[in-house]
Image: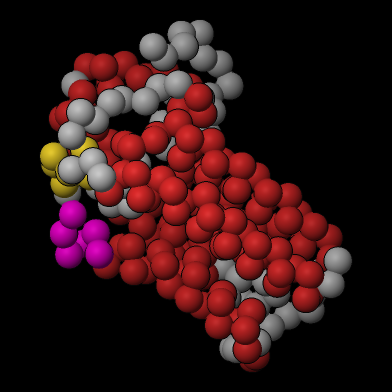
Amino acid sequence: MTLSVAKAIYLILAIGWYIIRIPHERRSRRTPVSRSARGTKEIVLLSISLSGLGILPFIYVATGFPRFAKYPFQPSLAWAGAVAAAAALLLFYLTHRALGRNWSVSLDLRENHKLITSGIYTYVRHPMYSAFWLWAIAQALLLPNWIAGPAGLIGFGTLYFFRVSEEEKLMCEAFGSEYRDYMSQTGRIIPRLSNPHQPR
């Protein structure tokens, strides 16, 4: 493993995510939004996440900037980052496949929105967030730069901690006891070790 290969793996992760998302984004746009929690806060949070997971690491990969923040490349960390990147892409694929037209980049409910509890959603309520956490971890391990590397953890972490409770509140309002039962049976982003009752 070399630094150039590690940078290429990060780019493959970003490109792969985009390739997975394109068809689902096109399909979901055809389904009107019936309820949304979008607003200034949501735009700010998405911008922070994009900066940490995309803009800053892309600048580093393309130019090496900021050079003052670099540290020695460690192949063993990069290999771990490659594994995390592969796991992230797999989770992205499984999440989009399960959601279908229900997917949205923002806090939206679409017409005839269904509560998905099958596929990857059998194990966690927010596998998309799980995938982005893996992306952020992969980025930190692949890019030996104290700013570009952990920027994803900070950027996405900011979005996650300010948004996930709002999303669950929206789902509780939309699906009531059905969603609350689902919450009691699943982990938020990590599968529960013991789950005696599988969700419907």
Above or below, 36 relative to 82: above
Q: Residue 52's x, y, as percent?
A: 47, 69
Residue 140 at what x, y percent from top left? 63, 65
Span highlighted in magenta in the image: 38-43
Q: Is residue 19 magenta?
A: no
Total numbered labels placed on residues in the image? 0
Looking at the image, which is closer to me, 97 or 63? 97
Q: Is residue 147 above or below residue 174?
A: below
Q: Is residue 63 visible?
A: yes
Q: Is residue 162 left or right of residue 56?
A: left
User: Is residue 41 in the magenta section?
Assistant: yes
Quadrant assignment for the N terminus: bottom right
Residue 146 falls left or right of residue 189: right
The residue at 27%/67% (across/down) is 44
Of residue 65 and residue 165, the one placed in the foreground of this image is 65
Residue 59, located in which quarter of the rendered image? bottom right
Mostly what secondary structure, the magenta segment? helix
